[in-house]
Image (cartoon, rainbow, N blue to C red):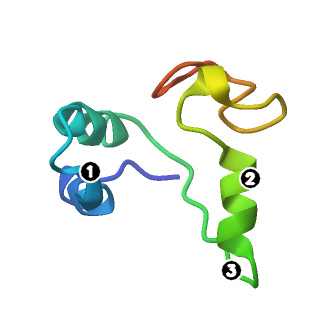
Amino acid sequence: MLVPLKKFAKKHYHDLSERPFFNELYDFLSSDPVIAIVWKGEGVITYGRKLIRATDSQKSAPETIRGDPAVNVGRYCF
C-alpha cells in the first residue's frame, strides 16, 4: 500500500495528458493510498482487461472490478 506521488501519477497516465480530465485524474490517483499490484505471466494483459472491464462503470459487467463497486466513472464504493 502506498500513496503515489503526483510525479508518478502524471507519468502513469501520460497517454491521457491531452484529455480534459487529466488534472483531476492524476490528483485523484495521488490523493489516497492505493494497493499496488504487479502482474506477471503469459496473457496477463488480456486477463487484466477482462477483470477490470470498461472504464464506464455503467457498461461494466457484474463480478468485475469496475462492474461491482463502481458508482460512476472514477469513483468506487467499497
Give the labeled residue for mark 3. 40
Of the 4 image quadrants, the one containing the C terminus is top right
Residue under pointer 1: 16
Q: Residues within 10 Å of mark 1 (few under 14, many from 20)?
A: some
**Residue 65, position as x, y percentages in the image:** 70, 38
Q: Residue furthest front?
A: 59
Type of amino acid under label 2:
Lys
Residue 29 placement: quadrant: top left
Distance CA(mark 1)–CA(mark 3): 24 Å
In the image, residue 3 lies at what x, y percent? 38, 48
Q: Is residue 58 above or below residue 20?
A: above
Q: Is residue 62 above or below residue 58?
A: below
Q: Amino acid at mark 1?
A: Leu
Depth check, mark 1 against mark 3: the one in front is: 1
**Residue at (26%, 42%) from the top-left corner?**
26
Q: Earlier in the sequence, mark 2 or mark 1?
A: 1
Distance CA(mark 2)–CA(mark 1): 21 Å
Identify the amino acid type marked 3.
Lys
Instruction: Sort mark 2 into few (<14), some (14-19) or many (20+) by Cα contacts within 10 Å.
Output: some
Ranked by sequence position, the earlier of labels 2 and 3 is 3
Q: Quadrant of residue 37?
A: bottom right
- Cα–Cα gap, marks 2 and 3: 15 Å
Please name the residue shown 77% across and 38% down the image: 64
Q: Which residue is mark 2?
A: 50
| Circle 3: element type | loop
> Horizontal and vertical percent for residue 77?
62, 18
Q: Nearer the viewer, residue 30 or 39?
A: 39
- Say whether marks 2 and 3 touch (CB < 8 Å): no
Q: Nearer the viewer, mark 2 or mark 3?
A: 2
For residue 48, above or below residue 34: below
56 lies above or below 54: above
Tell me the tag on residue 42.
none
